[in-house]
Amino acid sequence: MAKYLLLKHYRGGPAALNDVPMDQWTPGEVSDHIQFMRDWAARLEGTGEFVDGQALSPEGTFVRYDGEGRPPVTDGPFAETKDLIAGWMIIDVESYERALEVAGELSAAPGAGGKPIHEWLELRPFLAEPPTITE
Amino acid sequence: MDEALLRALTPTVIAILGRRGADFAAAEDAVQDALLEAVRVWPDDPPRDPRGWLVTAAWRKFLDAVRADTSRRHREVRVDSEPAPGPAGAVDDTLQLYFLCAHPSLTPASAVALTLRAVGGLTTRQIAQAYLVPEATMAQRISRAKRTVSEVRFDRPGDVATVLRVLYLVFNEGYSGDVDLAAEAIRLTRRLAAAIPHEEVAGLLALMLLHHARRPARTGADGGLVPLAEQDRGRWDTRLIAEGVDVLQAALARDRLGEFQAQAAVAALHADARTAAETDWVQIVEWYDELVRLTGSPVARLNRAVAVGEADGPRAGLAALAALDPNLPRYTAVAAYLHERDGDPVTAARLYAEAARSAPNLAERDHLTRRAARLNLDIRRRGAVRPGPAGSGTG
């Protein structure tokens, strides 16, 4: 099994095919979209492949160490940040091919006009534990 | 609380419930419930007859479940509350469980989870922790696996190779947290080896023992991986090595070579060398030739190239490597190592850094990064960047 992080981007990825901002959808379309995401996660729970998932606020803060005895420095949020992550899911699947399949299903979530968004999702493999037998 | 005893009794009790008429899925659930109760009750009130206690508790759980299920469906209970002994299976019942849990209709991860629960007697929570997934996810994986095998008839031995692949996975993969998966794999393989005289079961057991023997030396004080050549061989477990070699020799004497025996033979040759310099690489190359012949595995070919590099020199190793697909996992790491041995630190450092970027796990990435860093430091200290030998610029 291999774990993958699925990243949804507010921006930073290539544009979706059905790229209409969510506030331009009908309320019903928004509800359908949310329900689709829930059903997707529930299906993966049922197959024993779901690990975790969370949505993230678009506003974030940058923090860094500023030397001994001083409080950390904060900065941002930066309006110009190109890459903005909207949320993430972790899946634990049999193969890369299965990860692609699952991500493809999520990308079909309905948007404006009830049509699939064709949203680009970023798929990142976890660095696993080292195997015992390597020679 | 004797957890080892509980685990050892698990498949036996599942088999007893099976003989009394419970199907596998129900029997397995009932025994898991009984295990959880034992964990709760035994510390304060240890039973005189643990096995009898477990059978009674599991049978009661099974009847409760059947009754609950039946009242839901408004049907008659078909199972007597007084158990009949039932006919004994043609093959050892525990052995049957191994085959069922490794059934080819299951995905490898499902087979691993089901084996650890039904044969290994681990709880769902322990298995979930070992594979770093939520307990609910692991519970679903196990119940789906049980549904998948529910149609499988329980009276014929399966293919032992499928069981060995599952046990190999348990040994080789997974996060060793609360439960020591390597030790668990060895225990289950030992039990299988005791149940059936099969040369490849023995081969796998030997392979596990010989690798487990090195475990204390595999990790440095900083938690990093220590490669075989740099391990403190005084920390290898000589008792496990002796046992592994014995098991392997008995298996090889049956004269039916298989991939696990060949891999174990390589491990035994490493174990036999008091220092890395004393390693019999010529024989190791011959075993890799056997392994390539048996499996055709590209990983075996890659490992063979490393061995050729040690037996016949790094140029020969690089020549063997050149015949392989550069997209193989660890290809670049092997190329880096062979170039380092060939006295070309510049190329080696570049390839180590490249290999680190595509390393499949953190420990290997850190190890490769350190090697690149060390070579780069040496190169800087020598003051001038010396170009590598002609023709060795790439892997």
Image (tube, rainbow, N blue to C red):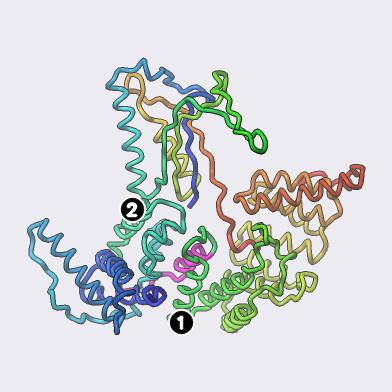
Q: Which residues are magenta?
A: B155-171
Q: Chain of mark 1?
A: B
Q: Amino acid at mark 1?
A: Ala
Question: B288 or A31, which lies in front?
Answer: A31
Q: Is residue B156 magenta?
A: yes
Q: Which residue is mark 2?
A: B140
For badge 2, the amino acid type reads: Gln
> Residue at the spot x=29%, y=77% of the render?
B45
- Crowd class of label 2 (few under 14; some 14 to 19; many from 20; radius 10 Å): many
Quadrant where the image shows the N terminus of chain B: bottom left
Q: At which x and y percent is residue B306?
A: 73, 60
- Residue ID for mark 1: B194
Residue A130 coordinates in the image, percent (x, y): 59, 56
Q: Secondary structure at mark 1?
A: helix
Q: Quadrant of residue B320?
A: bottom right
**Residue for point 32% across, 23% down:** A30
Return the residue nearer the eye: A45 or A64.
Answer: A64
